[in-house]
């Protein structure tokens, strides 16, 4: 097996056709087919299912493509790291962001990376923390912002800070004027939250269980946009970091009350693989990401004015997570 075969296999998987992959690679189709037959003989099994539908990967093919992609990324990192030693970082960096971070920080991060490191190609992937951990481990991404940082074997975790979580409600014009709400009062509210597989839901459930509070979750939904839309209807509530509803707070459609007694917080951390060296470009992107999160949560007015006036801590006020 060689790197060319892995690249050929990846191209076929992406194109779904030997003929299209051959054109992309600049090869003849018979030559490409021959190289794949040689690889199948070496591995002792078929890599593709061929039919009227085109070409699909077998289980063996899926495994080889997945692990091969990580190998090809490592080879590319070696090349780009070697070039970066003599100048500014170059090459591609894949960054994973949870939805609540991606919503308000993707654009600032991309702009800052482009300004400071024009030789880098930044690829931003948005997903749940659990998927981001898997993709870090497999080499599909270089670094990721994570909330769920416990029990993450194979990852190197660098805490950034913690952020407060808020009860989010519709602004209907007759709400009780409070900047905070005790956690015990959450039990009486109909909530819309992500499913139990979502890191935010897991963190909330663990915290309220420790406080002896049982939640009433009437609707489970993964989409942050739809979650906020349901809350705007006025008969449901949700729990989110303030940054996730910043625009809605500004336009007056939603209100945020800090959850207290006890305060509900979650850690934010930057994670990389513990098994693969980090390129210079990925290290520089990590610095930009950490700084962007600190600025967003500590210094740009994400805190409701009443919470500040009442002496509540701003988002991310608590000491750096340990």
Image (cartoon, helix red, strand yellow):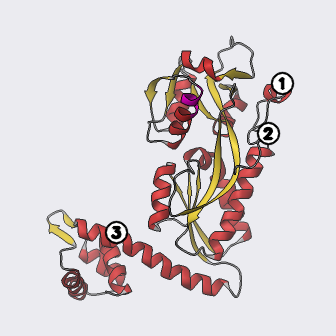
Q: Residue beneath label 3, please?
A: 14
Label 1: state its secondary structure: loop
Percent of width and height locating residue 83: 63, 86
Structural distance between the alpha carbons of marks 1 and 2: 15 Å
Residue 240 shown left or right of residue 288 in the figure:
left
The secondary structure that dominates the magenta segment is helix
Q: Residue beneath label 2, please?
A: 301
Q: Residues within 10 Å of mark 3 (few under 14, many from 20)?
A: few
Q: Nearer the viewer, residue 207 or 89?
A: 207
Structural distance between the alpha carbons of marks 3 and 1: 55 Å
* Quarter of the N terminus within the rendering: bottom left
- In percent of the image, x 31 and y 68: which residue is there? 63
Percent of width and height locating residue 231: 55, 24
- In percent of the image, x 58 and y 33: which residue is there? 207
Q: Earlier in the sequence, mark 3 or mark 1?
A: 3
Highlighted magenta segment, given as a residue range: 207-211
Q: Are marks 1 and 2 in contact (CB under 8 Å)?
A: no
Closer to the eye: label 3 or 2: 2
Percent of width and height locating residue 74: 49, 78
Using the image, determine if residue 129 lies above or below residue 155: above
Residue 118 shown left or right of residue 50 in the figure:
right
Q: Residue beneath label 1, please?
A: 310
> Given the current orientation, which residue lies at the most extreme left position?
51
Using the image, determine if residue 4 lies above or below residue 280: below
Structural distance between the alpha carbons of marks 3 and 2: 44 Å
Percent of width and height locating residue 313: 79, 34
Q: Earlier in the sequence, mark 1 or mark 2?
A: 2
């Amino acid at each position: 097996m060689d790197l060319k075969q892995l690249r050929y296999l990846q191209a076929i998987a992406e194109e779904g056709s030997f003929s299209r992959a051959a054109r992309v690679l600049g090869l003849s189709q018979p030559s490409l087919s021959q190289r794949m037959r040689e690889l199948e003989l070496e591995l002792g099994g078929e890599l593709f299912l061929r039919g009227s539908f085109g070409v699909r990967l077998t289980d063996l093919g899926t495994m080889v493509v997945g692990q091969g992609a990580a190998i090809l990324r490592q080879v590319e990192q070696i090349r780009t790291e070697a070039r970066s030693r003599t100048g500014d970082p170059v090459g591609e960096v894949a960054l994973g962001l949870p939805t609540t971070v991606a919503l308000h920080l993707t654009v600032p991060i991309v702009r800052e990376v482009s300004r400071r490191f024009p030789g880098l190609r930044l690829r931003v992937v948005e997903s749940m923390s659990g998927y981001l951990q898997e993709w870090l481990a497999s080499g599909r991404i270089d670094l990721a912002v994570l909330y769920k940082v416990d029990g993450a074997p194979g990852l190197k975790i660098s805490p950034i800070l913690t952020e407060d979580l808020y009860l989010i409600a519709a602004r209907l014009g007759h709400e009780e004027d409070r900047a905070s709400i005790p956690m015990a009062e959450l039990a009486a509210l109909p909530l819309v939250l992500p499913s139990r597989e979502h890191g935010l839901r897991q963190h909330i459930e663990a915290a309220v269980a420790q406080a002896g509070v049982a939640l009433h979750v009437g609707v489970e939904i993964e989409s942050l946009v739809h979650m906020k839309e349901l809350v705007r209807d006025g008969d449901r509530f949700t729990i989110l970091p303030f940054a996730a509803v910043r625009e809605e707070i500004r336009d007056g459609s939603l209100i945020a009350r800090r959850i207290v007694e006890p305060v509900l917080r979650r850690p934010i951390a930057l994670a990389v693989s513990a098994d693969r060296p980090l390129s210079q470009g990925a290290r520089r992107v990590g610095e930009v990401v950490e700084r962007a999160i600190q600025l967003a949560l500590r210094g740009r007015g994400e805190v409701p004015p009443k919470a500040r006036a009442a002496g509540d801590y701003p988002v991310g006020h608590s000491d750096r997570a340990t």
